[in-house]
Amino acid sequence: MRICLYGSGSRKIDEIYTDNAYRLGCRIAELNHTLVFGGGDTGMMGACAKGVHENGGKTLGIAPEWIGNFEPLCETCSEFIYVDSMDERKNEFVNNSDAFIISPGGIGTLDEFFEIITLKKLKQHDKKIIVFNIAHFFDKMIEMIDEMGEKGFLYKQEELFKVCNSIDEIFEYL
């Protein structure tokens, strides 16, 4: 299975997040899955890719070359796809992934998350989407989404994503 990870590339985040990302990468490799990610060498992306790489797994990085001006790109990827834009990058994530894990991140991660659930809602894919809620990072966002549904702004016809609080829970769902 090709598992896409959305998450921060920041070097400033607490180790509780990057340690979990690293362990997630280890498990991805142990189960012979492939990590698909934004190609960053730092933060959640870098930690997960390092876990995959150090355990003999495969990684596919996808990024525009110019993103290297903002964050270092991972040099140990099994394969790398260079694209021209962030929109093209997100399209390649969808085309090259069987499931999606959203890990803690910032605006870019939220953009990717909301696009992938919107595409699922619009029946453009039927892939599993998991919110990896490390240390309750996404609690307020989930509360907001629930409130939007309660007030009629969202249709709750089917489960668009699953919230998981542990790596074991993620792979039980997958």
Image: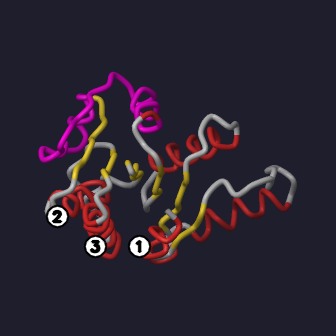
Q: Which residue is mark 3?
A: 19
Identified by mark 3, the residue type is Asp
Q: CA gap, disc 1 to disc 3?
A: 12 Å
Indicate the amino acid at tag 2. Asn
Is 7 placed above or below 87 here?
Answer: below
* Cα distance in 3D space between marks 1 and 2: 16 Å
Left or right of 2? Residue 71 is: left
Q: Which quadrant of the view contains residue 42?
A: bottom left
Q: Is residue 106 left or right of residue 68?
A: right
Disc nearer the start of the sequence (1/2):
2
Q: Residue visible at 55% across and 47% down?
A: 127
Q: Residue at x 20, y 38 (%)?
A: 79
Residue 13 visible within the image: no
Of badges 2 and 3, nearer the viewer stands 2
Which residue lies at the image location 33% right of the left edge and 22% below the top edge? 84
Which numbered disc flags the more N-terminal residue, 1 or 3?
3
Q: Is residue 144 left or right of residue 131?
A: right
What's the CA distance linking mark 2 and mark 3?
15 Å
Instruction: State whether residue 5 appears in this view.
Output: yes
Q: Amino acid at mark 1?
A: Ile
Q: Residue at x 49, y 62 (%)?
A: 174
Q: Within the image, what quadrant is residue 83 found in?
A: top left
Instruction: Name the spot of residue 93 as percent of width and height, x first.
Output: 42, 38
Q: Mark 3 or mark 2, which is nearer the start of the sequence?
A: 3
Q: Identify residue for label 2.
A: 55
* Residue closest to the eye, 10 or 173: 173
Disc 1 packing (10 Å; few <14; some 14–19; many ≥20) = some
Q: Tell me if 59 is positioned left or right of 155 in this view.
A: left
Q: On screen, 39 above or below 24?
A: above
Q: Which residue in the rendered view is the most extreme toward the right? A: 152
* Position above or below: 94 against 147: above
| Secondary element at image label 3 | helix
